[in-house]
Image (tube, grey):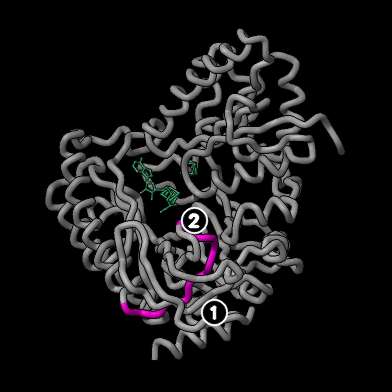
Amino acid sequence: MTETPKKLFIKTYGCQMNVYDSDRMADALAPHGYQPTQVMEEADLVVLNTCHIREKASEKVFSELGRLRELREEARAAGGPGFMIGVAGCVAQAEGDEIVRRAKGSVDLVFGPQSYHRLPELIKRAHNGATIVETDFPTEDKFEHLPAASREVTLARGLTAFLTVQEGCDKFCSFCVVPYTRGAEVSRPLEQVLAEAHNLAAAGVRDLTLLGQNVNAYHGLDTSGRTVGLGELCRRLADIEGLARIRYTTSHPLDMTDELLAAHRDVPALMPYLHMPVQSGSDRILAAMNRRHTRADYMRVIERIMAVRPDMAMSGDFIVGFPGETDADFEETLSIAREVNYASAYTFKYSTRPGTPGATMDDQVPEAKKTERLQRLNDQMTGQMRAFGQSVVGRVLPVLIEKKGRMPGQVGGRSPYLQAVHMEGPERLIGTIQPVEILAAGNNSISGKIVTVAEPKSVSVIESQVAMAQA
Ligand code: SAH
Ligand code: SF4
Ligand code: F3S
């Protein structure tokens, strides 16, 4: 299929799933002549891939649309055709009609996450003038219709990649819009995931992060119709030549099964860094949030994880100022963050989302209180993150060398804990995993020294060199 070359600009908001989706939209449009551009003004199509999770994220879309409209008018005043404007993602799904109403004819396309495979057809229809709104949850599997990226495109995206294996959520936490924007929980079939992972690995991807709103609830079917959990999926992925590192996010404590923990015990490629949010340390608030577990339940999950991987570092999410949260509840949040000893965390002020049960609860916490609590939690977390950084100084870590460094003769890479590491080393090491002694840890990156250059491709050899260097 060859069509006139066109340019596509996608601006991505929100979580990693949106980052993945933006790439898949670009892949869907590539056979139709669309090449990505970083310059909005030269685009034929501008897509905002939006996030609805908090009020601020969702309001950004409306201000960005105003700016886009002006830019387009300027382009048209200068005699050009201007660009087509599309809104994708979770705001499109949740507020499609509102976008059309507020945009007053300036948006050409509004389409939800389940329609990305239909993008080429939607664009053709939008050329006829009217705004197209596509926010149904179709029955067909979009992934079966989304084309894969070419090898060159995958290579250009780097050695690390995302792969969505599960979408949607059935948990209905009382603060959260995801079950409404992404729909019911659906897992992709095993073979489909393995085939995509094979393509990524063949193009050079070494570090793969499996994505899902509730990724450890993964229950894909294999070709014989048997249900496969995330643990088995990880084992199968670890057998793929070239895939050295496997991660997954975001996991829910209730779905941390024995099968998955056994995979953490047995599969060295599963990285010892886990994002498993708790949101609050108070049982009262956890119940009001409908998280369906207590603080003690969560701590027991942590214990089971540490029993199979004592070197596991944890990361989490917290919400402060959920309706009814008292000072005492908040103290419990500070204390669970210390008790778990998180290496990192994302912290948020509770944001009221229309349509969720939290929005109509009594005892909404005043904004000033939320701000004060967020500040205290952030101060504590900054200290914990710094301490974690310091804790790796002096250790030898396997580092995936990803790119040239800022200085000549330097390379940059990533530790198992997703820390950016820079060190002296030749460019030919890009794509390999090297044993690196960590020398110093700053706020945003750490520096190290390659212990012995590991030339072989085999991951197990490198892992054993790391073990030797540590001994
Ligand atoms: N599925 C994941 C979370 C996805 S949303 C889980 O269950 O952990 C990512 C994070 O955004 C959540 O963990 C939560 O901390 C935050 N979040 C979600 N809704 C929010 C809201 N209404 N206000 C503030 N933060 C919110
Ligand atoms: Fe939202 Fe809860 Fe589902 Fe996570 S588990 S996506 S927080 S409803
Ligand atoms: Fe936002 Fe949708 Fe992700 S609401 S966090 S982009 S699933």
| Point 68% across, 74% down: residue | 241
Rendering quarter of residue 29: top right
The span shown in magenta is 394-406
The residues bearing labels 2 and 1 have C-alpha atoms spaced at a distance of: 21 Å
Q: Is residue 260 magenta?
A: no
* Quadrant occupied by the N terminus: top right
Look at the magenta stretch and give its main secondary structure: strand
Q: Is residue 75 above or below residue 110?
A: above
Q: Is residue 235 left or right of residue 386?
A: right
Q: Is residue 63 above or below residue 299?
A: above
| Point 60% across, 39% down: residue | 113
Q: Is residue 367 left or right of residue 243?
A: left
Q: Secondary structure at mark 1?
A: loop
What crowding class fits label 2: few (fewer than 14 Cα within 10 Å), some (14-19), or many (20 or more)? Answer: many
Location of mark 1 (residue): 267
What crowding class fits label 1: few (fewer than 14 Cα within 10 Å), some (14-19), or many (20 or more)? Answer: some
| Point 66% across, 22% down: residue | 132
Q: Secondary structure at mark 2?
A: loop
Under 8 Å from ligand 2: the CB of mark 2?
Answer: yes
Which label's residue is closer to the chain start, 2 or 1? Answer: 2
Location of mark 2 (residue): 214
Q: Amino acid at mark 1?
A: Val
Q: Is residue 397 magenta?
A: yes
Q: Is residue 284 above or below residue 30?
A: below
Q: Amino acid at mark 2?
A: Asn
Rendering quarter of residue 8: top right
Instruction: Determine if residue 337 is in view.
Output: yes
Mark toward the viewer: 2 or 1: 1
Which residue in the rendered view is the most extreme toward the right? 1
